[in-house]
Image (cartoon, helix red, strand yellow):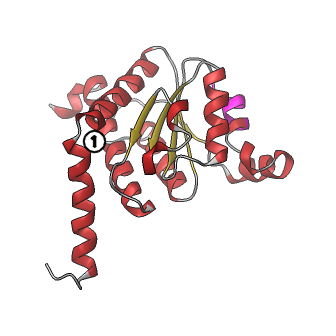
Amino acid sequence: MSATDPIAAAFAEARATLDDFLADPVHLDGVRRFADEIEACYARGGRLLAAGNGGSMCDAMHFVEEWTGRFRGDRAALGALSLGDPSQLTCIANDFGFDEIFARQVEANGRAGDLLVVISTSGNSANLLRAAEVARGAGITVVGLLGKGGGQLAPLCDVSIVVPRAQTSDRIQELHIKIIHTVIEAVERRLFPGNYA
């Protein structure tokens, strides 16, 4: 591979990030715990909530649509809500400030037994920190898909999965979406094994 080939270098860096993730059993254990928490949430009649900023909001929306729609095969819809409705975001930001855009929605829609997924490449987004604080106070499990060491969000999460090595949002987000798909498949295999026969 030529050092001057940015396309090949980008793929190599993405592969190296995944290799580093797979090399540490802590990361795979976190993914397994994430799947366990989702299964337990649904078993107790809870619902999934998800939030992120920018590209991480897109990942949060992608995460929930796989539950309400389908992943590998037809099955019953499962409760999941992305905290990304533009009218709510702008209303809350206008009335209470941007730091409260997710916390207010968790307060309004979250219930004890639910699970909140916070997705942040920095781990330091103030609006996600507030959402995690509100969730914990309401008896809602918090899972973090994080980067750059996990930031301030890591200690507020019941399960923190921190992408190693990567220092840029794109590399971190690439692994976040791989984690999302892997967890969905793992849970769906447990709840709907007929889809994998």
Q: Residue furthest top?
A: 44
Callout 1: SS: loop
Q: Is residue 95 left or right of residue 141?
A: right
- Above or below for 136 versus 73: above
Q: Residue at horizontal 24%, vertical 74%?
A: 9
Please identify the quarter of the rendering in which residue 174 is found: bottom left
Q: Using residue 100 as the reference point, say whether residue 14 is left or right of it.
A: left
Instruction: Name the amino acid type tagged 1.
Output: Arg
Residue displayed at 33% across by 42% down: 71
* Residue at x-position 66% and y-position 21%: 137
Tell me where residue 132 appears, x and y as whole percent. 60, 33
Q: From which residue to which does the magenta span run?
A: 104-110
Task: Indicate the quadrant containing the C terminus: top left, top right, bottom left or bottom right.
Answer: top left
Q: Main secondary structure of the magenta part?
A: helix
Image coordinates of residue 189 in percent, x first then y, are 25, 29
| Quadrant in the picture for the N terminus | bottom left
Q: Which residue is mark 1?
A: 72
All told, the count of numbered labels is 1
Q: Would you say residue 170 is visible in this rendering? A: yes
- Whether residue 147 appears in this view of the structure is no
